[in-house]
Image (cartoon, rainbow, N blue to C red):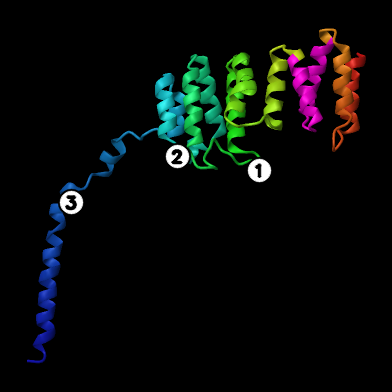
Amino acid sequence: MLSLQPIRRFCKSSSAAIASNNRPEVTLKHIQSPKLLEDKPLEKPALVKVRAERDPEKLLQLFKANAHNRLVIENRFAFEDTVSRLAGAHRFDYIEHLLEHQKTLPQGRREGVLALGIMPDEVTCNLVIKGFCQAGYLEMAKRVFYTSMHTKGCQPNEKIYQTMIHYLCKGGEFDLACTMCKDSMKKNWYPNVDTIHALLEGLKKNKQLGKAKMIVALARQRVPPFPSNRLSSMQSVLSN
């Protein structure tokens, strides 16, 4: 009798195994074949959708809908490109709406704010200004600089001055670029050497040598100082 117990257990387990082997025949019908899965089109990544969208309203909604998507919302180039295209479509109301929406996001999720010492709102304004400039709307960029920033409680920082001076020179507005450059340099915020060169060339071409000399004099006061060869190259612009 003792020797039958294992046999009974084996029989029971064997029956259970046979029963279990029969079950997959039913469940396998519900499993998709690998080919069916391959045939399903893959959804485009959100960043690709944002870059490809040409309808201003859909672009705004798409950007807002991806506020949780770090690949989109923390990509400053995507934000800058979005602003530029909305400006190109003359949808300045959408840009304003996008700015307001950005203010509702947690810090660190606003268009890739990774630079130390820069407040997110200032970064946002800089990107908006750059977006307007790249779309050819210098007047709108100036409006953001002189009006919108102050109403939103933001102050221009070094990056914003650099952006404005650079694009004002590209647009041939050397008088205003000179004024901004002087204000910026007095705060020890200096544009890069290429931008200073472009400004000096423009002032010289417009027969405003006195202003150009003032910019070079201010450049010599930079702390830490520009390398001597850089200062010499600035001086050479006035001499040639």
* Disc 2: CA contacts within 10 A as few (<14), some (14-19) or many (>=20): some
x then y, percent, for residue 132: 58, 19
Task: Give the labeled residue for mark 2.
Answer: 69
* Helix, strand or loop for disc 2: loop
Contact? badges 3 and 2 (CB < 8 Å): no
Q: Amino acid at mark 1?
A: Leu
Q: Which numbered dot is residue 116?
A: 1
Q: Which residues are magenta?
A: 176-204
Q: Amino acid at mark 2?
A: Asn
Q: Which numbered dot is residue 28?
A: 3
Residue at coordinates 89% horizontally, 27% vertically from top-left? Answer: 231
What quarter of the picture does the C terminus occupy? top right
x then y, percent, for residue 168: 70, 17
Contact? badges 1 and 3 (CB < 8 Å): no
- Disc 1 from disc 3: Cα separation: 56 Å
> Is 212 left or right of 57, judged from the image as shown?
right
Is residue 123 in the magenta section? no
Up the image or down, 223 lies above or below 14; here it is above
| Total labels drawn | 3
x then y, percent, for residue 79: 53, 29
Q: Nearer the viewer, residue 64 or 175?
A: 175
Q: Nearer the viewer, residue 16 or 98?
A: 98
Up the image or down, 170 lies above or below 222; here it is above
